Every structure is written in structure tokens, then in C-alpha cells.
Image: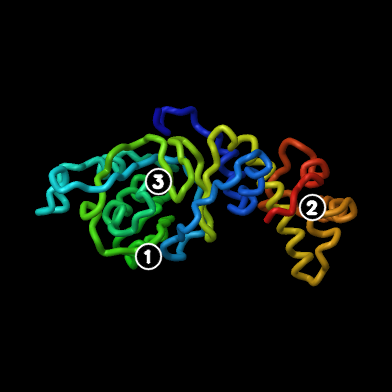
Amino acid sequence: MTASSLAPVPPEVLADLGRASTATLATQLYRRGIRQPFLVGLSPVGSRFQGFVGVARTMRFIPAREDIDPMDDPYRTGNVLQWEAVERVGPGEVIVVDSRNDITAASAGDMLVTRAMKRGAAAFVTDGAFRDGAALAELGFPVYSRAITATTRPASFHVAELDVPIGCAGVAVYPGDILVGDRDGIIVVPRTLAPEIAGPAAEQEALENYLHSRVQQGEELWGVYPPNEQTLAEYREWRGARDTAAADAPVYGESTSTSVNSMEATR
């Protein structure tokens, strides 16, 4: 089963996930038993984008072997799965590479990443390294890796499979999972949990932005974070007074008082 063969994720779910930070999503997943969904050690290449939300398309590397991956021409080894992955990726999808946390060679470079971007991909992610870091930083496209290297992929890696469950930065990623990235990094949202947490995550983000503004103004944590009943009442009053046409996260599911009363101060 590939990401493309699954039923589409409702756009409102993706929109709500995109309103939340990776920290907020981690809290929501923690409350549902997912302890460590963050791709630790991966950083965005460049700063010309704000973040992304997308559906995972996976790629798995194994070590290269000299009799299988000839070294005379790294672009004509016969291992073309990497090119196939880029030419298959669709709008809103994320290429996620299991590079075994190995940065001795690149998972891809400027040409393949640019092609994925032109096909409408949401991001390109590896737990290894990319080539052409300076060029990638200027694309304005979400690219995340552990490092930058000049060494070409066939020096270390053979592309073994596409669209299979992988491990990326120690986190299981299944085709069709939802990846959300921001300036801090990337979190993996299991596809089955995405509709359940999307609304509460957007709601939590709106609340915590309000609470942060109060702490920023010098208020102490007691009663503000986590919020007591008085603070929640003040939040509802403040929110109700805002222009409903503003880019607020809408309230879904539980009422604000119910859902945020149980919020754990885990951020």
C-alpha cells in the first residue's frame, strides 16, 4: 500500500495540523500514548520557508556494495529507484529517506530536490545528509537533514525500496503518515490519529499563544500555565472579542474548558 492508494486526508485536517507547532503536536500525541514522534537531530536547510504539512512517501537505503553498485560512473549505476521516487511524488507529499542515520554520503542533491519541488512535493527529508547545501538553502523549499556533504550517494548507499515502512531518525514512518515541519524540526503524526488530534492541536496552539503573551508580559506561571479556571474564562472572553474573520484556529470537538483543563504542562 502506498500513500497514493490511501483515501485522501481531509484538507481541513491538514490545515489544522499546519496551525500547530511540532511541540504542540508532540503534546497531543503524548496524551494518546505516542511518546517520541519527533525526528531528533534533523534541521532545516536554509531559512526561506516557514514549515510544511505533507503525506509521507518513503525511501529505504542499504549500504552500497561494489559488485552491485559500480563506481566508474555514480550517475549510471543502474540503481534508478531514487529517480523513480522523485518522478512519482505528487502534490502535498513528502519524500522521507531512511539513510540509517549515516552522513557519509548524500541522500540527494539540488537536481533531485528541485525536481521534487517542481512536482509539487511538500518537503524532502532524510536522516542522513544532502549535497549542494547552499543551493538547497536558496530554493525556499522545505529540506531537512542531519548534515551537508559533497559525497555522492552511490559511495555509501544503494536505494533498496520505495513506499515501505522505514525508520527515520529513530522514528517509524509508514507510507501515508502525516509529517509536519517547522523551524524546530519534524514530527510524525500517525495517519489514523491525524483527524483526532488536528482540531485539539490547533485549539491548544491558539490557547498557548495567548498564555505565552501573558507570561511575556511578566505574569508568573501559577494559574497561567497550566491555566486555572479564571485564566480560561479570561481566554474565552479575549477570544470571543476577536474578529472572527482573523486567522484563528477554530474550536473542534470538546469545549475549550474541557480540553484545556486536562492539558498537561509537558512542553
Which of labels 1 and 3 is toward the front? 3
In percent of width and height, residue 193 lies at 59, 35
Residue bearing the label numbered 1: 138
The circle drawn on residue 172 is none
Residue bearing the label numbered 3: 96
In percent of width and height, residue 165 lies at 41, 36
Q: Badge 1: how crowded within 10 Å, few (<14), some, or many (20+)? A: few
* Rendered image quadrant of residue 151: bottom left
Which of labels 3 and 2 is toward the front? 3
Instruction: Measure the C-alpha gap from mark 3 to mark 2.
Output: 38 Å
- The residue under the point 41% across, 59% down is 146
- The residue under the point 62% across, 54% down is 23
Q: Nearer the viewer, residue 22 or 36?
A: 36
In percent of width and height, residue 39 lies at 49, 52
Q: Badge 2: how crowded within 10 Å, few (<14), some, or many (20+)? A: some
The circle drawn on residue 239 is 2
- Most distant residue in the right direction: 230
Q: Is residue 209 left or right of residue 70?
A: right
User: Which quadrant is home to the C terminus?
Assistant: bottom right
